[in-house]
Amino acid sequence: MNIKVILEAKLKEGFYKQGAFEYKKRLSGRVEIIETDNILEYIKNKQNAYIITLEIEGRELSSEQFAKKIREIEIEGYYNEILFLIGGAQGLDKETKEKSDFKFSMSKLTFLHQEAVLILMEQIYRAYKILNNEPYHK
């Protein structure tokens, strides 16, 4: 299953970029980070993609529930990729939010978009450790 983290901004700070790309490396190419100026334009021709928007109003999941959600999407067999959409400083626009298959909140706290990418990458990494019964997750 291809997973893409689509960011409507840039990863500017070196330490966020370094952390996010460390998890990307650990995930052995399973996850791609894409920076774009227009998420809606990027996703408009995406078919068979399960779209997860990161929204403070979304549903909060534990790490185990998040792993289970990823596994359910993979098993369903209809989708060939999961797209996690993260807005820039202004968040995601209404039209983009309407394209969402699942609205996900990592917390009721507001994060910088760069922090959100890093946290999400770590949680994807953790999810696969959980799914593979590996000891990373305690």
Image (tube, rainbow, N blue to C red):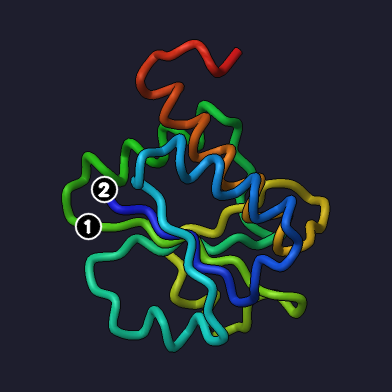
Q: Earlier in the sequence, mark 2 or mark 1?
A: 2
Q: Is mark 2 on a helix, strand or loop?
A: loop
Frontmost residue, 128 versus 58: 128
Residue 67 % position (x, y): 45, 33
Amino acid carrying label 2: it is: Met
Picture layout, residue 35 above or below residue 31: below
Q: Which residue is outermost to the right?
A: 109
Q: What element carries label 1?
A: loop
Residue 98 % position (x, y): 50, 77
Q: Tell me, for residue 62, which label it has, or none.
A: none
Q: In which quarter of the image is the C terminus?
A: top right
- Disc tally is 2
Q: How far apart are marks 2 and 1 (CA)?
A: 6 Å
For label 2, count other residues whose C-alpha is less than 10 Å away and answer few (under 14), some (14-19) or many (20+): some
Q: Please say if the residues under marks 2 and 1 sit with CB atoms less than 8 Å apart.
A: yes
Picture layout, residue 68 above or below residue 80: above
Frontmost residue, 13 versus 53: 13
Residue 135 % position (x, y): 50, 11
Q: Which residue is outermost to the left?
A: 77
Amino acid carrying label 1: it is: Asn
Q: Is residue 77 left or right of residue 137?
A: left
Picture layout, residue 18 above or below residue 28: below
- Name the residue: 57% across, 69% down: 7
Residue matched to label 1: 80
Q: Is residue 19 left or right of residue 13?
A: left
Residue matched to label 2: 1
For label 1, count other residues whose C-alpha is less than 10 Å away and answer few (under 14), some (14-19) or many (20+): some
- Name the residue: 35% across, 20% down: 132
- Name the residue: 22% across, 39% down: 75
Residue 30 % position (x, y): 34, 46
- Name the residue: 41% across, 32% down: 68
